[in-house]
Amino acid sequence: MKRAVYPGSFDPVTFGHLDVIKRASQIFDVLIVSVLNNKEKSPLFSVEERVKILQEATKEIPNVQVDSFSGLLIDYAAENDLHIAVRGLRAITDFEYELQIAQTNRKLSREKLDTMFLTTSLEYAYLSSSSVKEIASFGGDISQCVPDFVAELIFEKYRIRQNKNKE
Ligand code: PNS
């Protein structure tokens, strides 16, 4: 059985991520989308929330599983017997960063973890979780960036933040 992991922050998942998930799920028998629990970042959504959002957003794709991990990807991959990581490439600006991570992972894992890149569909090439959050924080329209239920959750987060700031 061909299994792969798609690691990321997914804070929050965008249509760009979902495009990669759909396409990778057609290549592998099982795709594990795994949310990085990065304690140094201050995410909009907790890991648990991001896992739930991903589960809801991928519920129609039977061979997609959602998980989370902390620490190094190579350790998580080894513990779960995963040998391929999937990543999306939007533009040349992603390439340098992704190449460095992929090569580091391959070296550190003694060639046990390879990375497979899918080029993001052109219609989503401009999308990033950070820009979605920035647009939403100013009340902009993110309906073309994330599923409706995710947009509602993002706006809800910013409403809570704004109310806290007023207190
Ligand atoms: O969605 P992101 O934030 O671009 O995803 C980055 C991610 C999670 C793939 C990458 O930061 C990662 O794998 N982090 C885990 C820590 C790790 O293994 N670092 C070594 C790579 S140099």
Image: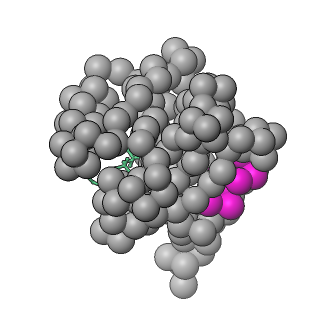
Whether residue 133 appears in this view of the structure is no
Picture coordinates of residue 60, whole percent (x, y): 81, 40
Q: Residue at x 40, y 67 (%)?
A: 70
Residue 84 image-quadrant placement:
top left
Main SS, magenta residues? helix
Picture coordinates of residue 76, whole percent (x, y): 41, 59
Q: Residue at x 76, y 39 (%)?
A: 61
Residue 160 image-quadrant placement:
bottom right
Total residue callouts: 0
Q: Does residue 34 belong to the magenta stretch?
A: no
| Closest to the observer, 167 or 115 | 115
Whether residue 122 appears in this view of the structure is yes
In the displayed structure, would residue 81 be above or below residue 18?
Answer: below
Picture coordinates of residue 97, whole percent (x, y): 24, 35
Residue located farthest toward the top when viewing the structure as drawn:
122
Q: Is residue 77 left or right of residue 123?
A: left
Q: Is residue 158 left or right of residue 115?
A: right
